[in-house]
Amino acid sequence: MEKNKVVSQIADINTDFTQWYTDVVLKTNLADYGPAKGTMVIREYGYELWENFKNELDRRIKKEGHKNVYFPIFIPLSFFTREAEHVEGFAPELATVTQVGKEILAEPLVVRPTSETVICDAFARWVSSFRDLPVLINQWANVVRMEKTTRPFLRTTEFLWQEGHTLHATREEAEAHTIKMLNMYVDFAKDFLAIPFYYGKKSEKEKFAGAVYTYTVEGVMNDGKSLQCGTSHYLGENFAKVFNINFQDKDEIVKHPHQTSWGMSTRMIGAIIMVHGDERGLRLPPKVAPIQVVIVPIASHKGGVIEKCDEIKNILETKGIKVFVDKSDNQTGWKFNEWELKGVPIRLEIGPKDIEAGNAVLFRRDLNTKSPVSLNNIETTVAETLESIHCNLYQQAKQKMADKTKSVKNMEELNQAIETGNFAFAPWCGSRECEDKIKEISGASSRCTPDSQTDSIKKCVYCGKECKHETYFAKNY
């Protein structure tokens, strides 16, 4: 069958990845553009995807002992000026309210770009003793950052996220929690989204403003660019000192607690699209998909077809599988292409001949293949296939990640890797000067330095000095 119009309206993923991404977002009804510059409207299909993401991540966050809270979206500007590095890092992105009606505010209010400052103000009132620690909280909220260049889900003026904030009595406890939450993100992405990550420490240049250090999870997109998918920060005593957060320890000495913060956002929907998508559109991992199985009746006007489709739907739903029966009057070929575009993991085709034979035709979106399956124990077959799809999508993504990562020894090799749409894993001495020069020459920024490395001596790709660490460099979204 000739390619359907619905799919032909999507740009070629291999020749125009940027337009392909935009087409997929808009034509699958994940999102639309908002009226204000850089904003987006998350549509029904996209928001259900976000809800599934949010519910599972929230479950895991609570399993680690955190409780959800909510803080105000408006923050006094003076809160940001207390921590110099923090305000410098966010200054270009701050949106402020200076006037209400005809009244000029005595102090401008910042529309929340992140919540460390307003939360620290509360921590100073809540904590006075070691008995008050640890504090483990999480917030699901919207934030505003005035980005110059925007793209739906990847960078928008307003987006949704979770931000965790914790206080601990000791540095060791806080650092351990920083790594724990980093690993939670890695496991969540693998187990629920079928996405592998590179993860490790950010450079001083790339770390969160105000942090002692930042850990990050970096996804390799289909075009070889990096997407920072989540971060976990060890804030040390930096914010505690400027916001006067103190506690009396067991030894009766007054100390500052050690702090962490960490977060993931709606940017992860962009990651799902760009890691798993193909020339036909979305390929959604089954666990996060709004619809896991779509049943398409064949010759639905004939007696018994719709009834059988509804029967199979009910059987699958009793096993917790999310099912939709497409009873629309659209042509069958259009339906096939529409659901492939939307990335539904499994399509079941059921017609009179299938019913007579006791079968259905099962289409796997990950492989784009069809095969007959028995309607007997269809719930077991579908459940096993969904698990197989998840594993296959993860392995495909992991293989692409490996294929798009090149180990390099010098700037010539690094440039070649970046120019051909890859990550470069390169020895780097750690200096800001070399980091800046590498980006100036190649356009690639440092993404992360894994903790686990060999002890072999290498030479920095730019200056040639001896070093022990290799770092991932890539162009990024």
Image (cartoon, rainbow, N blue to C red):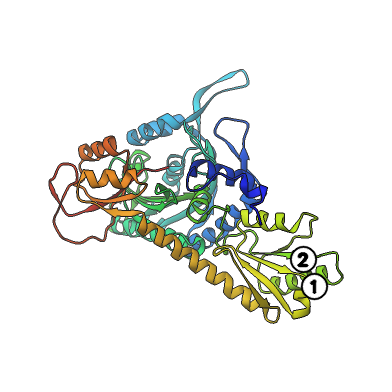
The one nearer the camera, 141 or 10, is 10
The one nearer the camera, 142 or 27, is 27
Look at the numbered discs 2 and 1 and tell me whether their residues touch, using CB distance below 8 Å.
yes
Disc on the earlier residue, 2 or 1? 2
Name the element at disc 1: helix
Q: Position of residue 264 (x, y in %)?
A: 47, 51
Mark 2 highlights which residue? Answer: 298
| Mark 1: few/some/many CA within 10 Å (<14, 14-19, 20+) | some
Residue reaching furthest bottom? 376
Residue 71 seen from this side: no
Q: Quadrant of the C terminus?
A: top left
Which amino acid type is shown beneath numbered disc 2? Ile
Residue reaching furthest front? 2
CA distance for labels 2 and 1? 7 Å
Q: Position of residue 455 (x, y in %)?
A: 16, 61
Which amino acid type is shown beneath numbered disc 1? Pro
Q: Is 180 on the left-hand or right-hand side of 350?
A: left
Q: Position of residue 147 (x, y in %)?
A: 47, 33
Vertical side of 386 occupied by 29: above or below: above
Vertical side of 380 occupied by 270: above or below: above
The one nearer the camera, 425 or 1, is 1
**Number of numbered tags placed on the structure image:** 2
Residue at 62% in and 77% down: 381
Mark 1 highlights which residue? Answer: 352
Q: Is 329 on the left-hand or right-hand side of 273?
A: right
